[in-house]
Each structure stands twice: as C-alpha cells, then as structure tokens.
Amino acid sequence: MIWKRAVTLEALNVMGEGNMVGLLDIQFSRIGEDSLEATMPVDSRTHQPFGLLHGGASVVLAETLGSVAGYLCTQGEQKVVGLEVNANHIRSVRSGRVRGVCRALHAGGRHQVWQIDIFDEQDRLCCSSRLTTAVV
C-alpha cells in the first residue's frame, strides 16, 4: 500500500463539503492498494454550452484525485500543491457519471506525478490526465 495516512471514504467525502469538490458532487468511491477513485455527474453543473462534459470539469476531477492521493502519501504537516496538469480529452460524454482512477507514476518526497484516467459508464476512456505536485 502506498498510502501513509489512514483515511476512510466518508472522511474524504467530508473534505469536499463547502468547496468546488462538493459543488460538482465529486464523490470518492474507492481506496485501493495503489489507486484512488471518485465519480462526478455529467449534468448542468459540468456541461459546456453544447451539452457535453466540459473539459475543465474533467480537469477538476483529475486534479482533485491527484491532490488528495498526493496528500495521502505524505505525513504529519506535509501538504501537496499542484504544479502542472495536462488532460487529453478522448471521448465526449453527455450524461450519467464519470469515474476517475488515479495511480502514482512517482510518489517521491519532494514531488509526485499522478496518472488519472476518466471513464464513462460503459467503462470507455474519456480523458487521460497527468498531474505533477510538490510536497510542501
């Protein structure tokens, strides 16, 4: 297991209350041995003007997953901050919920690199994202 902090899904979901995570109804759904997952609705909150999932909303899901995963890999008073995020939008989504799966490419003591893949309800890849964080 890569996580250094003990946490529950309930505690992660409480962290999202009162900020953008809660506003977009991002829900953490799974903590694996080396992965973290969350879902997000595809609806009026996350649509762009043409009725498709907004690329920026996908990036919010990706950065949320990577930042929280990064935090779970730290100890004590350490925190993580995002340095760079990249997203390739592969398939459009009109409705339902998307699921983000986050895995570490590198979880070092000073910086981290996270791969976040976002899937539609048919388990098709919609977005592939990479987040680099600094440990502070």
Image (spheres, grey):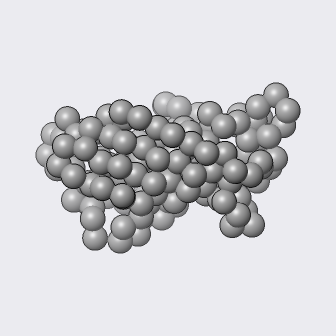
- From where the camera sits, is residue 134 visible? yes
Horizontal arrangement in the rendering, residue 82 relative to residue 45 (left or right) = left
Tally the marks. 0
Q: Residue at x 21, y 59 (%)?
A: 4
The quadrant holding residue 77 is top left
Could you tell whether 59 is left or right of 91 in the image? Answer: left
Residue nearest the viewer, comparing 132 with 28: 132
Query: Is 25 drawn above or below residue 100 in the view shown?
Result: above
Name the residue rendered at 36%, 67% in the picture.
34
Q: Does residue 75 appear left or right of residue 54 in this picture?
A: left
Q: Tell me if I can see residue 41 in this picture.
A: no
Residue at 56%, 42% (x, y): give it: 87
Q: Quadrant of the N terminus?
A: bottom left
Q: Residue furthest right?
A: 50
Residue 43 picture location, percent across and down: 76, 41
Residue 102 screen position, x and y as percent:
46, 57
Percent position (x, y) of residue 128? 57, 52
Question: Where is residue 67 shown, x and y percent of the image?
Answer: 38, 43
